[in-house]
Each structure stands twice: as structure tokens, then as C-alpha cells.
Amino acid sequence: MGTVKGREPFRWHSTISYKTVPKIVTRGYDTTELVEKGYGFADVIFINYQARIPLIKEVKMLHYLMILCLDDGMSSSPSIARFVAKGHNILTQSAGASILAFGHAYGAFQAFGRMLDKYLERAEKEGKSYQEMAEILVKENRGSLTIGVSNLMLKDPAAKRIFARADSLDLSGRYVAFQREVVKAAQKASKEPVDLDMLGAVGATMFDLGFTPEATWSIAALARAFGSTAHAMEEEEREARVLFGQNLQPKENYDGPADRSVPSLKDRDKAAKPGQAKTLDEWRKAFDERAKLGGSGWAIVEEIADPRKLAKVKNQ
Amino acid sequence: MEREPLIKRKSAISYKTEEKTVLRGYNLSDLAEEGYTFCDALFVLFQGRIPTEAEEKMLEYEMGEFLEHSMSPSAAAAISTMGGRPQLPAAVAAGVMTFGGAHGPGAAHGYMLNKYLERARVEGKSLKEMGKILVDEYMDAGMPVMGLGQPQHIHGDPRAMPTHRKQKELKVDGVYLDLQEAIEEAFNKRREAEGKKTIAVNMIGAGNTALAELGFAPNAAWGIGILCRGFSCACHAIENMKKGHAWMASTRERMIQMLDLSMIVYDGIPDRPVPSQEEREEYAQGELEKGEYKKWVL
């Protein structure tokens, strides 16, 4: 179908692992040798993600953080896992659904980590202290729900205990230090009481353990998925299955267009309204009109990278 | 901020207040503060109990061992999914969701063991006898005996026998391991009698047996296995995201990429002209009458 001349045949290329008939090797270590020599689950997570044997205290901290990620009551991920389980399918689908619940609001570890990296880099470049840069971060991200500070943990000490544990294990680094300043800056700027939340505490500590924002995102989502599988099984055990077409949606919960008769096909042209805009004003008007219809998607505006703000590269 | 529950359910797993998150009666933060491991917490989650040290060690061993398996359907799915550059959770979920009837059928193996353990109990048979009955019933029916053989580790999965041994070393062996070993013995005796090569236990046979022995229900054990593998799937996906090319079809790379056009082998219906709309009805009717299309129907 295409030309292959002079090129190597396709092979799975990986810097992480390989396997042969007699062994499986991750980052250079035989996985059976690892566990035979007493390394455990969390050790292998460090090895896989960071290609290094962790310090014992780092392993302790990772276990600590993953326990806190394990369950959160009936939040998004176990709830979606339960909904999937109601269809009576195999457990892997509920587990996958739980992971898919993680995004840039719920469990926003990638976005949060990138944000911290961006401001830490700026602090270095601009010669600003963490305190100064935290104030800038809070100002520039006003209204954001994912700066690791919110009103979610005002009565629950779990988030603050994470930082205390990181301190006691001597594992707090620049991320924890900076996040502490972000908390102070947010508290100063907010009229309502706010404090370090689980995103901020788990995220900053994971970053100080050397995990990237992406690694942290996936580790947290997977840790939570263990809890979600228990919820999925409980749903199967205790709740009824749901059939296609079973659930009703009461009219009082509907606020879309009022009931109307379907025009006959021969009257179609009279009823149909073309969707094309011929001028930009028409387009804008149609855009705003469409945005009023829930579920149309027009009210959602996603951020995309502004190429004007990116460094210039050579022509491709 | 709205903090009402997303769905209203009675649950025996956990609750969460403004003050704390409680799993099976334990404050999660206290559990972590006390120094329990994530593996300990999985016992609390799935079984509502704190495990013994030996049980925790066995789970650590198994999860450490199962986490990475290089190129398996799960890692391949995670990498392929990331090739389209969705968000990372999509690739991780794709990896996890590859597990099914062929790739790590953990729950099914667990249900099989439970069924035959119960039969041994009710029928007053020894586990050795029941292992042979299981093997004969499966093989007579032409069904594969779960937990044996691995398509890549053709001389035996390097993780499997050490897992059996570790169970004994940590003294966390019991009826599940007894039955599993009886299955392995009966299976290979029968194969030898039939003049066939022996086949070793795989990680479902060994790992799932250990998880069952640790008290995990078949689906809980499966969940632990697939999610444990999810971590390495995530690594492979992130590697592709950060170091690989999207689409995996670039012709500028030294090595032919997975989705290079040259990788496609087509042996379907030869190229044919599209009938015009005027010809359509007659053409379609002809196809229905000839029925050749049926061999391509999926």
C-alpha cells in the first residue's frame, strides 16, 4: 500500500519495558527478580514511571497518597462506574468508565501540575519569590476551581495532614512550598474561607516525589478506580439492573422547546429554517441563539492554544 | 459549592462528610497516617478487614509483578489510543478495558475455582480428585482450561511458578492453591497421555489463585489485576504522548510506523465501480439474488 524501501520494519519501540520468552523487564529490572527481592507494588510504580528504585520513605508517601485517592464516597468516578454496572456488563467497563471521569475539573492533576510548573518557571525567570509568584497565580487564575485551594476541606484535615506527612518524611520540596504560598495568597484574596484541598495536597506532594502531572493524573485515576470497582460490584449486588428504554424523564424536569406538531414532509420547506449564515452578524446571532439550547454544545467554549503566544519554530 | 451527592444510594463501602472520608468504618486519612499501605487498603475496600502482614506482602508481590507486561493487548491499546491524542485517561481506560475473555480472564478463573471447590465439598471429593474432574470436563467439552498457557511465554510464564512458591513461603496457601495445583497436574498428565507437550500455569492460574486465597472475590481480584496493569499502560501511553509521533503513520521516521500504509494487507472484494443511481435498484437486487456478499458480512 505504501513504500517501505530503505526503512526498518515496524516494531514496538519502548524505553519502558521488554519481554522475552523467559522474562519481563521494566527499566532494566526483571520484574520477578524485583518482587522476589522484596520490592512491592509502589516500588514498581516508581520504577515504571521514573526508571528508578525509590527511597523507602518515598514508597511510604506514595502508599499514603494512594490510600487517600482510593475512595471519596459517591463522587463522579464511582457514580459513573455504578451507572455502567447497571447495564450488566463486565467489570472492566466500569473500571474504564471510572478512569474516564477524570478530566480538567474532577481530578485535574495534569492541568494543576502544568499550572504549577508554569508559575514556578516564571518565578525562576523573573526572579520572583514563591510568595510573589503565588499572588500572581491567584490573581491570574481568579475563579478557577483547580488551583488546589477551595472550600472543600475546611473541616476535613486530610489534605493538611498530607503536607505534614511529607514534611515529617522530609519529602516536601518546591511544589509543596509553592502550593503553601498559593494557599496563603488565595486565602488573602478570597472573601470566603478557603484552604488547601485534595487536588493541591495530593498533586504537589506527588510532584515532589518526582511524578509528572501526567503520571500523577493516571496514578490518581487508577487508585480511585480500585474503589470504583467495589462500587460497581455493590451496584450489581444491591441495585436493580436497568433496561434500554426503561427510565422516564418527567416533563416537569424538561425545559426545552414546548410540545409541537411534526410538519408533514410536503410542508417541510415551510417549517425548515436554513442553518447557514451568510454574514458574520448572522453567524454571531445564530451562535448566541443556538447556545441557548442545552445539549447543543454551542454554550461550551474550550480553550485552545493561541499560536500567537507560542514560540516561533522553523517552517515545517 | 454544591456538595449534594451525585446519586442517592445506600452503600456499605464508604461515606464522606465535610469532616472525613470513611471506608468500611475506617477514616481513610487515619489509615494512611497509621502507616498502612495501599495494598492494606485494598483489603479494607474489598473485604472490610485489615489483612495480616503476610497477606499484605503477598498482595504487594503480586501487584508488583503484574504491573508491567511490556507489549500485551492492554499496552498496545493504550499506545494506539494515545496515537489519536485524546486526553490521557482515555488511553489508560482503553488499556484497562482490553481485559476480557482472552487477555487476563481473571474473574472467570475465580468463578471456575469456586464452582469446583463447592462441588468437592458437596460431593465429598478431595481437591486432587476434583482437579482431575475439572480438567476432564473442560477437555472433554473441548474448552480451554483457564489459567494455563501463555502465547508469548511459551515455556511457562516467568511470574507464575514463583507466585505459587511465594504463597507457600508466606504461608498464605489454602484450598485454592491446592485445587489449582491439582488442575495443573491433571491437565499435564492428560496431555502427556495424549502425547502432547505439557503446558505451564500462567498468571491467571497463579495470580488469581493467590488473590482468591487472600479472600478477594473473582471480580475484586480481576479489578485489582486490570487496574494494576493500568499503571504500566499509562506509562506506555505517556511515552507515546511525550516521545512518539501522533497518528503513528509518519513516513519520515527511520522505522516503519504501526499505521504506515505499508502495514495494510487487503484481501477483500477487488476494486469495483460504484453503480449510478439509475442503475442502483437493479444492481442491488442482483447482489441480493447472487448472495455473494454474504461471505463478507460481519
Image (tube, rainbow, N blue to C red):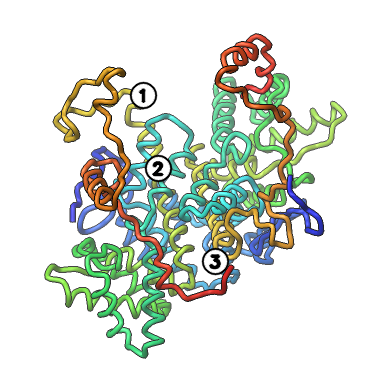
Q: Is residue B138 above or below residue A144?
A: above
Residue at the image point whose x is 28% and y is 65% from the top: A197
What type is the residue that disc 3 sits on? Phe
In the picture as drawn, the residue positioned furthest to the left comes out as A191
Q: Nearer the viewer, residue B278 or A254?
A: B278
User: What distance separates the C-alpha of mark 2 from that of mark 3?
Assistant: 26 Å
Q: Chain of mark 1?
A: A
Q: Chain of mark 2?
A: A
From the image, state whether disc 1 or disc 3 is nearer to you: 1
Residue holding disc 1: A243
Q: Is residue B67 above or below residue B221?
A: below
Q: Which mark is residue A46?
A: 3
User: What distance separates the C-alpha of mark 2 from that of mark 1?
Assistant: 22 Å
Of labels 2 and 3, earlier in sequence is 3
Q: Which mark is residue A230?
A: 2
In the picture as drawn, the residue positioned furthest to the bottom comes out as A127
Give the image location of residue A139, x and y in percent. 23, 75
